[in-house]
Amino acid sequence: MRLFPSLTDDALADVRFDAQGLAPAIVQDQASGAVLTLAYMNKESLARTLETGETWFYSRSRQQLWHKGETSGHTQKVVTIDTDCDHDSLLVVVSPSGPACHTGRFSCFDGDLESERARFGESGHDILAALEDRIRQREQERPEGSYTTYLFDKGIDKILKKVGEETAEVIIAAKNRSADELRCETADLMYHVMVLLREQTLPVRDVLTELSSRYAKESPRAKS
């Protein structure tokens, strides 16, 4: 039985494969919205993806089907599949169980944090996006010696304990009337909250959307 009835037989039939019988498949992380990789599907790999709920692709170099994570264990659970307006490309939103790239990185398009900062700039939302990407990388790649890796390895109880501790530190800093101390402790708290959001697979953008909604309700124009 197909797991994604929203992609109907008619929609599947409408996918426009190229002369080689392939269509590009953009794979996107559900939690962060990050693009993980660009692969290719033919009719058979798409059918297997729909049937199993995990991504299957077609390797142009090996000229055969391949199941993502079959050897590494880093499978991708499919959340949604859509076609573009021309029906010749696929967008596959997934919940990955490990890195998408064969190099061991979370995404085939990942760069280091400095390049992310250069790309995003220094605005508040952009820095949050860069930090969210870094936390996401750490969760999936688990580099040895990383504090973020340590938190994810220890699990939810440790992360919650740190959120509680950092909240108390913010309160103490505010009572001390120390701007420097409050700045540093607030940054620590925000970081640990973002680790918690990732552990819960809740995107930061959802929190920002909630804040935006509340801001709109408090707007004088909205009340008039």
Image (cartoon, rainbow, N blue to C red):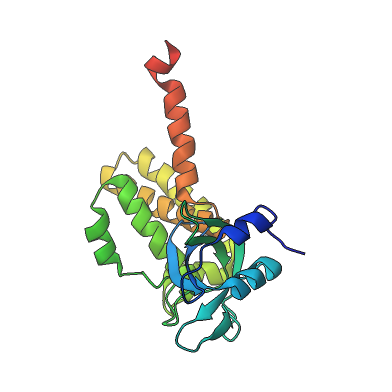
| Residue 183 in the image: above or below residue 152 | above
**Residue 90 image offset from top left, x and y in percent:** 50, 61
Quadrant where the N terminus is found in the figure: bottom right
Side of 201 where 115 appears, left or right: left
Viewport quadrant of the C terminus = top left
Above or below — where is 142 with respect to 81? Answer: below
Image coords of residue 49 (percent x, y): 63, 69
Residue name at image x 40 percent, y 61 percent:
133
Q: Is residue 187 left or right of residue 168?
A: left
Q: Nearer the viewer, residue 6 or 110?
A: 6
Residue at 61% across / 55% down in the picture? Answer: 11
Q: Along the line of sight, which residue is nearer the eye, 194 or 203?
A: 203
Of 2 and 35, the residue lying toward us: 2
As drawn, the residue found furthest toward the bottom would be 62
Instruction: Count the labels in the image.
Output: 0
- Report whether residue 143 is seen: yes
Residue at the limit of the structure toward the top, as seen here: 224
Residue 18 on image: x %, y %: 46, 70
- Residue 160: give x, y in percent of width and height: 56, 56
Q: Going by the image, does 23 lie left or right of 8?
A: left
Residue that lies at the very extreme toward the front in this rendered image: 19
Q: Is residue 79 visible?
A: no
Q: In front: 19, or 217?
A: 19
Residue 160 in the image: above or below residue 46: above
At horizontal 62% and vertical 75% (from top left) the residue drawn is 44
